[in-house]
Image: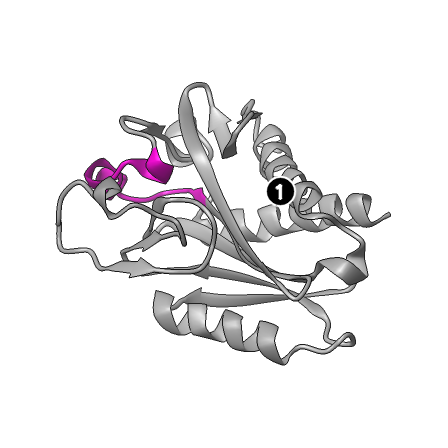
Amino acid sequence: MDCVVKHLGRVDYEPTFQAMQDFTAARTPETPDELWIVEHPPVYTLGQAGKPEHVLEDIGIPVVRIDRGGQVTYHGPGQVVIYLLLDLARLKIKVRELVTAIEQGVIDFLSAQGVVAERRTGAPGVYVGDAKIAALGLKIKNGCSYHGLSLNVDMDLYPFTAINPCGYAGLKITQTRDLGIPLTAHEAGERLSQHLLRQLDQQHG
């Protein structure tokens, strides 16, 4: 599949969210799909039906309400975020298949680094043992997706303690560094994007 991969570096959350909405609103049937690989300064994002009470305490990190599914999650430096701006109708991929492809891409990436990970029924994302390592949330508009996934690489995990991650009280969070994977967020993003594109190719094929 043809897909433009953009490394945007560390960018503020809200302008990036706006840019995703603008890109999706302006795209035509000919617009190439894009993957945006980014890091964000500290921010909590609260999904469309997200409950504010899942933010347990104010530790000075802004909370931004957005239009993806899911509850609250944290983005911060040392976490790779990949946004998937895809024309699902053109790819002939259903939303459920896209979620499966994203999860499998993360599982394959971790497997290549010697770490066994799995998905959980009814709780989107990827887990290593009982700890969550990757979160995902999507918005589908006019048959096109935006938002995407976040993978914890080498970050300060403390801000996760001030929320119920993805709406689950006491959910453990882990990251690749703590599993002995020596990649930077940039390197992890590069490799993970390749696994994602391979999965999307298979779903599309």
**Residue 163 vs residue 57: left or right?**
right
Q: Is the N terminus in the top left, top right, bottom left or bottom right quadrant?
A: bottom right
In front: 57, or 81? Answer: 57
Residue 10 shown in magenta:
no
In this rendering, does residue 1 appear at all? no
Picture coordinates of residue 141 (x, y %)? 60, 64
Picture coordinates of residue 89 (x, y %)? 76, 60
Magenta span of residues: 151-167
Residue type at numbered disc 1: Val
The answer to which image quadrant residue 9 occupies is bottom left
**Residue 35 vs residue 165: left or right?**
right
Please rate how many residues cluster around mark 1, counting C-alpha atoms within 10 Å: few if below 14, some from 14 to 19, many from 20: some
- Work out whether 97 lies above or below 83: above
**Which residue is found at the position 35% from the left and 48% from the top?**
50
Picture coordinates of residue 135 (x, y %)? 46, 41
Residue furthest to the right in view is 205
**Which residue is found at the position 37% from the left and 39% from the top?**
166
